Structure formats: C-alpha cells, structure tokens
Image (cartoon, coloured by chain):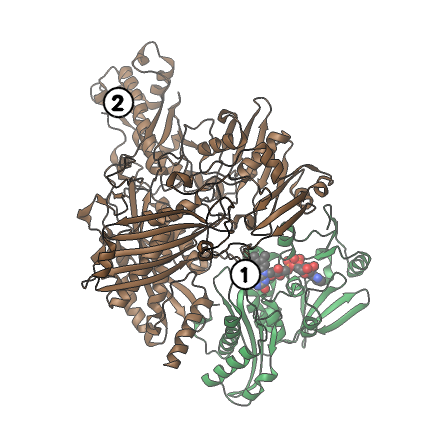
Chain colours: A brown, B green
Amino acid sequence: MTKGKKPSESYVGKSVRAKEARAPLIGKAKYTNDYSFEGQLYAYILRSPHAAAKINSVDLSGAKKISGVHLALCGRDVFEHTNGITDHLNPAIFGGKSTRLPIMAVDEAWCYGQPVAIVIAEDERTARYAASRIQVDYTPKEPVVDAEKAIAKGARSVVPEWDDNVLIYVPFMNGDTQAAFDQADKIVTTDVKIHRFSSQPMETRCYNAVWEHDTESITLYGTCQNPHPLRLVLAETLRMNENKIRIIASTIGGAFGLKMHGHPEEPLICLMTKLIRRPVKWVENREECLLIGAREQQHKVEMAFDSDGNMTGLRDHFLANIGAPSACPGWGMAFLTGLTMPGPYKVENIDVHMNAVTTNKPSWNAARGYGKESTAIALELAMDNAARQFGISPIDLRLKNFITKEQFPYPSPTGLVYDSGDYGGVLLKALETIGYEDWKDKQKAALAEGRHIGIGMAFELTPEGGTIPGTMVAGYDSSSVRVGPDGTVRVLTGITSPGTHNGTAIAQIVADELGIDMDRIEVLQGDTNSSPYGFGNYSGRSTIVGGGSAALAAKDVRDKINAVAAALLEVEIDTLSLSEGVFSSSDNGDATVTFAEVCYASYTRAYDVAMCIDPPLEATRTFKPPGISHLPDENGRINPYPSYSNAVYVVVCEVDTETGKIDLLSLAAAHDCGKVINPILVEGQVCGAFAMGLGGALTEDVQYDANGVQLTKSFKDYVMLRMADMPLVGMAHHDSPNPDNYLGLKGAGEAGVGGSAAALVNAVNNALEPLEVVIHEMPLTPSRVWSAIQNANNSEGVK
Amino acid sequence: MSLHPMYARPRNLEQASELLASLSSGAVIIAGGQEIMPYINYGVMMPDVYVDIGGIDALRGVSAETDEVSIGPLTVHRDIQNVEEIVERLPLLAYAAKQIGGGMQVHNRGTIGGNIVAMHPLYDVAPALLALEAEVELLSEKGSQRMSLSELQDLSNHGLGTSSILTKILVKPMSPTTLWGYYKLKNSAGAYGSANAAVVIQLDGENIKSIRVAIGAATEKVVVVSGNLDSYLGGPYSSEVGLAIQKTCSDAIGEPLSDQQGDGVWRKAMAGVAARRATEMALGKLNNSSSKG
Ligand SMILES: Cc1cc2nc3c(=O)[nH]c(=O)nc-3n(C[C@H](O)[C@H](O)[C@H](O)COP(=O)(O)OP(=O)(O)OC[C@H]3O[C@@H](n4cnc5c(N)ncnc54)[C@H](O)[C@@H]3O)c2cc1C
C-alpha cells in the first residue's frame, strides 16, 4: 500500500470548519421554499377544528368561486385518487394494529388539525382566503384525549374497527423480577411524567411538487430526511411507478426526526401537481408544525435494591399517548423507550411493559432521541430518587450499578448487544469538567444565604444507526466516489444531512483516504436521480454508514489511481508516495507526476498506460455495520443497533424559591461517540441537544384543552431557550471506539435531549432537597415549581 | 376582509384623520407593524386598507419642556431606550423599554404608540407610563382630546378602533430625587413577562412620602396600586414593610390571567413578588443577581 498524506496532515480528528455552513450563514442557502418555478401555484390546507367529529358534508363551492383558485378538493375526492399512505414503520410487523391511513379526513376527523380540504391558487393568500369560504358540516364527538382514559374499559375506539385504543403493547421481560422484588431490601417507586414536546426546526416543512411534462413524472422538492424511501411511499400512495418520481432534498434548516416521512402533505402536494400539471407548493406554518407531537409518556419506575445499593430488579409499566394513527414513525419512539431499558445499568431482572395508546390528539413523529431520551429521563430521575432515599450520593449509586468496562460486548436484558464503553469513566470526566467539588462548596455557601443551588447529572445511552428488519429503516448505506479528469472529487451519498454538516465529516474521511486536499471534494446529497440508493438520515447513522461507505469507495478509487500513477512512473505501486498532490517513487529518483495528471491519464489513455484499470475513476460501495444482528437469539430477540454512544450531562442551576424560576448556572457533558471525526461538529450537536433538552424540561410544552383542541400555536407560547438562558457548555470526549465500525465510529448527533433534561430535573430536585420538595413531572415551569414549594410549606405548617 | 388591500400613506394629521373617518371598519393604522404584521401573516387579520402613519412628521420626535416631556407615538423602542431627554428625565420608561423582548428588529421598528394602543396586558410600556401618571393626546374627527393613560385604559379594551390617532404621550419629568424600579418576571429569555411591576417612590428623609405601583401581566389590564399603600407612608422601609407591600399588591389582583407561562394562583402571588422586588430595586436594596429580570 502506498502512503498518502503524512499522518500529521490528516483531516480526521481535526476541527475543520463545516463547508456547508457558509451558505446558511450569509443567507445564500437554498432551502426548499427558495425553489419556485414558472406557473407556480400554492396550496392551503383546511384542517379540522375538532379532535373528533363526523364530517357530514364539505361544500367547496365558496372556495371555487374565488378568482385565482385552480382547484379545491375534500378528503373524499383525494381518497378516490390515492391509496392509503404506506406506513414508515408498520406496527403490524411488531404485532400491533394497523389501519388504512387516508391522506385527508374522509367522513370522520380523528384529531385537531387533520387535513379536511385543500385549495390550490395563484398565491398563498388567495388559497388561504378561499379555504375560509369552505363550509364543513361537522357533528363533534366526545374526544379520547387522555391515555389512561383511552385504555379504560368502555372507552370509545378512536379507530372504529379496532377493539381498543392500544396500537401496540410490548413486554420486555427478563429474569425473575417478581423474586427480585420479593427479596429486595428497598424498593423505590418514581412516577415520571414526560409531557408533549417536540422539535421545532427553524425551517418548517415545505413541499414543492413539479410536474415534468417531458417525462410525465413528478419532481418533489421537499424537506425530507429519507428521499429514497419516501419515493417508494409516494409511488405506492399515488399509484405511480417509483421511477416516475424524483425527490430533491435541498439544504435542511433543522430536521430532528420531524422531517422523516409519513406526513399526509407529502403525497397530497404530489397529487395536486399530478392533477393540475403545474408546480404546487405548500409551506407549513408554525401552528401546523406544532401539531406534530412526541414523547408524551407516563412512567411508573420501580427499582428493587439489595442492602448494598445494587439494583436487582426494574419494573416500569408505561403509557405513551401517541395520538391519532399516522404513517409517520413516531409511535416507534415508545417501542424504543422500552427496548433500551435498563440503559447503562447491569440489572438483569426486568419487567417493562410498553403501551402505545392511540388518542384523538394529533400524532407523533420521530423526535431527536427517538424514545431513548425518555428512557434516560425515566431511569435517571428514578436513580436520583433512589439515591435520595438511600441517603447516598447519586454518583456512588450510579457507579455501583453501571455496566463495567470489562463487561463489553454486553448483552442487555432486552436482547441488545452494547459494543463498548466506560460509563463510570464518562461520569467522572463529566463531573471533573463541571468542577463538581467546587460547585458543592458554592452550593453550601449559597444555602447559608438562603439560596438554592442544585447540581444534577444524568446518563444517556444512545444506541445509534438502528435498523428494523422488513422496513425501509435500513442499517447499511452506500456512497459513490467519483474522481474527475482534473483530479477533483464528487462524493454522492445515500445518506442525507439534517443540517449537522455530515458532508464535511465525510469529505474529511475521503480526503484522507485519497490523500488529497479537502477543498478538492464536493459532497452531494439528497437527489434520488444522482445519489446511490440510500436511506437518508436518522438514528445518528450518517457518519457511520455514509462515512464508512465513502471510505470504502475512496479506497477502491485510490487503488485505480495508484495503478495508473505507477504505470506512468514505471515503478511498482508499493514504492509510490503522494504528497501535496504529487506522486513520486522511491524507485525512480526525481520523476514525479501530479495527482491531476494521473487522473487525466486514467480517462484518456485507456489503451496504453491506463490499461491496468477499468475507467472511469468511480466506485460505489456499501458499508454494512457488522454489529447488527437480525437473526433472532433463543428468546427471539435481535440486536438492531451497531453502536451504543453514551454520555453524561451535568447541570448546575439556581432555583428562586420565591418565584419558582430556574436559572442555569453551568453545563457540562462528557461524550463517547467513538472516534471523533470533527470535534466542532460533535460539540455543536451536544450544545444543541442541551438547548433542546433543557428547553423541554423548562418551558417547551404543546398543550391541548380537555376537548383535544391545540392551545399552543406559536412561539409566544412554545418558548424555546435563547442564548441568554444558556451558559457555555463544558465538553469532554471520552472515546471508547466501536470495535467493528470504520475508524471506531459510534454516531453522534441524536444524543443528549433526555440526558440534559433529566440532569436539569435532578439539579432542581437537588436544589430543593433542603425544602423536601421533589418534582418528577415536566416541564418545570416556575408555577409548577412554586406550587410544589408552597405545598411543602403548607404541609409543614400542618405538621 | 380583503384579498386585495389598499395602502395609504397620509402626509399630515388632517389627511390621516379625514381618511380614517371616511373609511369603514376594514381600515387599520400601521406604524412599525410589529404588532399587526404577525396577525396579517397568519391570516388572522385581512384589512381592506392600511393607513401607514409613518409619513406624518408630527407624530415623531421627543421634546422636553420644564414640566412636561412630550413623546411622539412613532418613537421606536430603541430611541426610548437611548434618547437623552428620556434617559435623563424618564429613566423608568427608558429602563422598561429595555426589557422589551423580541430582539433587535422589534426594538428598531416597534413604536411606543403601537405598544400603547395594542393594550396588551403583557407589555412593558404601560406599567412604566401608568406609574408615571402619563397622559395621552388623541385626534379624531371630533378633534383633539387629552386624557390620562389610566382613563384611556378604562375606556377601551382593545386599542382605539379605527377612528382615533394617538398623537402624543405626555409625561411629567421625574425629579432627580424620585426613586424608581421596574421588575419583569419572565420564565425564560424568550418569554413575555408573567408579572411586570413599575414603582415610583418619593422619600422624605428615610420615610416613604409617596409610593405608586403599576403591575402588568397579572390581569387583563395593568393594575395601579397607590391608595392601598397609604398605610406605609410616613415611615421607613423595612423588610416587613416590603412583605406587606407584596401582600397588598397581590391582593389588588382581582381576576388573574392564566396562560402557558403560569396559572392564576401563581400569577397573583407573583404580582406581589414583582412589586416588592421593584420597590427594593428603587430603594437600592435588591442585589444584582435577582434583579436581572
Ligand atoms: C417577537 C416580539 C416580542 C415582543 N416582546 C415584547 C415585550 O417583551 N414587551 C413589550 O412591551 N412588547 C413586546 N412586543 C410588542 C411590541 O413592542 C409592539 O408590538 C410594538 O411596540 C408595536 O408597535 P408598532 O409600531 O410596531 O405597532 P403596529 O403593529 O404598527 O400597530 C399596533 C397597533 O396599534 C395601532 N396603532 C399604532 N400606532 C398608532 C397610533 N399612533 N394611533 C392609533 N393607533 C395606532 C395599530 O393600528 C395596531 O392596532 C413584542 C413584539 C414581538 C413581535
């Protein structure tokens, strides 16, 4: 093998500025909404104002009369032209229920905000105005809003043909949990309530469907994370051939899972262009974006401990209020919450039951963490609760119960196989990063002045790169590397970027493999007509499989280039070296040839010096992470994840006990995502995760009234944290490389929402310990914290 | 409701007033647009005519006489925060304007007139102006009219309708010995206030000579508490007096607001806390860590 760049010149491991960041920063990024075409039309979707209602009639005549309106359709009209939307993840595969998922409500609306009619007009205002002229006659029904009530005897089924509202029930059982509880020295019960909070990308969803007259096909410019799988869904739903659909996923202004497909607007806008044969665009507004739910779970975590504080049994029967049926993969979050129990703890006796409950609330979609954040919240709140009850330090209790370094690969009681890690090491590093002992002193000093500072920590295990057999959630992915005759490179990937700049990380990897400058590399993603078939981004997979496959392809191309270089210099390949774009040989004195000359020769001298290769300088390769196993073990369990990232988050805050307001004082994280390709990219993700998790724990909350009508409609009520709320994040990396993946990658980017949220709640409870106040219900709004303090004061008074 | 609205930009007050009188209820005055544009963008409002008052010079500028500061309603928040006449003579108002959220754009475009006319209970300008006993001048078809801001607040629930223009805000300058405080309790940096209290105090030696508190974000309208505080006059401030002021102010909140930032019980209690903290700020007793609103 030839030497490439000297190791000191390698890009991997360096904080290289993101290539893709320039355009958004200077306002030149081309987001989906920036595409407009001749004859562009606009859609407005009329939505149900009721959570549950019979639709008696839809009168579109008022809308059709408005000048500038091209088309107005109701749910039934759309139904005639389409099939039900293909599930992203069909619950029936896992033993759950399924139903036909119409694009718009037909005869019956099953949640607030469900599409009921659509208007296409010359401009957005006209479409919206015309939609206000549509008369829909509803007979409202008593909605099913609450998960507990939804599974109570006699509850009305949200989907009439179902016997009950449980979309799917999955038990995760191992060992003899009952015995563990019977013999326990101490049992700690923690009721954890996680509210509905989602992810709110700055760029809302947008679809612009263009009819291509020449090929009688559709090009969809869309905010989507998985262009190829979406293409199949569209083909099936629209009754078209898949090869008549092209998807272009342009720059994405944040995705977080919310732009994974299954949304009714995707086939709906395509159908419009198919019917009208003009480009049709729809842009989601913030109120619509807030309809997409996630994470609303109720846990009852019971932990059994022996007298030494070893956890011997874990029980958690939890409910997830997943809303109305949907083709989006949101419900799977609840599944993963169960599957990833008991997280980092070595307890073997577990009895975890997951009930994903269908209600008349709007449905979930995937949200960063994909259920694993809820596992972290439930477990870590419970661990702190246990430590409090034992009167021991939350650090010691965790260290005692963590899986140890030597135990990897570790088979989890739900069938997962954790690849590697040093959980205790990560915890200690995070505490060191924040200056734990210092803060303990400051806490004591503050308390003496009547101020309440709290320090909280939480662990999050984040399996990454997941795949589910029989679905388009695949574990592998492919990339092409194409080196042109001038020696510049195009990398095309099947993965896409949700705005995390994985293209830069992939360019770093390819530059190192080819031994050339990074600025000679362009990474192209998201166009189904040019990218290799791929599955896009989810589950922190993009650098593992996108980077891994690009590395393999680059190696193949490099072999061809080496062969031609050797032929040109008339030397053996293993005598070559490449430095600063110039090949030389230890066997041929001063003779040199540039990388670009070799590439040109590879294209132009196919019948003499380049006879040794098959032109062009291109290769497409796939990386299939070997850690995944879909072959069931003796208990029928599989390991759908190739890697298990993990991290510890620490939060220091002060609670103003007079108002209940929480001020953040300091934040830190120690993170194990295997080999770090680019520290600034990883750290950026961790900071973002902190902002999302803390925002969720403190303020972000999508509320509905008792009738299932959405109350939270804008950023006035859904308040995300701002720079001014956030202290700087102290970051430490604690890599334990994945033994199987390229460069030891584990995946970064998805982790942190649950860990940071749980650390905040733990910090607040730590701050309030002197007042004997404990809160396990999120979000920790000032009024909730204040009420808890008042109640404690009052009961004090009664004593 | 109109799909094809018209736009007018009158050049003087007479034109504007005549135009408004001639138009039906579909007309809307627009100043900085920071209030109504979000509604229009969301399709909640579809006016027939926009009457842009931005071209009327008479509505601009700040002038200070010995006994009155006159503020043109088109003065934007950024200027309220920085103009010398206001910073020196009405420091409470300048400080309250700094607490307005929404970032640079809102500060550079949003006007004090628009803020007052919107009569939104969560806003920051009205508590400060009510604590300062400000007056306003209105122009309608019937002519010009001057009244206290407090009267205007009692008269109307939502703005001035489409027939009147707010032409001036008039405030007596604060004397250099006037003590003042403003405390905005908000859940996070991006949230509206949940209790906004403005306080103006005069001392006679150590003793409180007068105290006036205005509390926003607690009820539909800004609540002014002054007479109820009379029992604390004539004596010095103490922490007991502070707690008593807190209770009196909290008790003054009749039907508290309840929104996603917090429920009514908490809101009512916080009105008192904010009032006490604003008072402590005025008296220089609030430490810096808890005064950052
Ligand atoms: C993101 C955001 C955050 C904000 N946060 C805060 C905050 O924290 N605190 C706060 O106090 N405010 C806040 N605001 C509100 C902002 O201060 C006001 O919207 C702004 O001051 C309104 O002024 P404008 O000139 O832009 O009003 P416009 O939108 O132009 O008008 C507002 C209303 O007043 C009427 N109007 C305007 N001028 C006159 C006049 N001279 N005579 C008669 N009628 C008139 C208009 O017809 C309209 O009804 C926020 C706004 C935004 C968008």
Amino acid type, residue under disc 2 in the picture: Ser
At a point 63% along the width and 38% down the height, the residue shown is A42
At numbered mark 2, what does the secondary structure look like: helix, strand or loop? strand
Q: Is residue A666 visible?
A: no
Camera-nearest label, 1 or 2: 1
Q: CA distance from mark 1 to mark 2?
A: 63 Å
A144 vs B180, nearest the viewer: A144
| Classed neighbour count for the residue bearing mark 2: other residues with Cα under 10 Å, few (<14), some (14–19), many (≥20) | many
* In the image, the residue with mark 1 has its CB under 8 Å from the nearest atom of ligand 1: yes
Q: Position of residue A3 (x, y in %)?
A: 24, 28
| Classed neighbour count for the residue bearing mark 1: other residues with Cα under 10 Å, few (<14), some (14–19), many (≥20) | some
> What residue is shown with label 2?
A584
Q: Position of residue B27 (x, y in %)?
A: 75, 55
> What residue is shown with label 1?
B101
Outermost bottom residue: B234
Q: In the drawing, what numbered circle is on residue A583? A: none
Q: Is residue A253 visible?
A: yes
Q: Quadrant of the C terminus of chain A?
A: bottom left
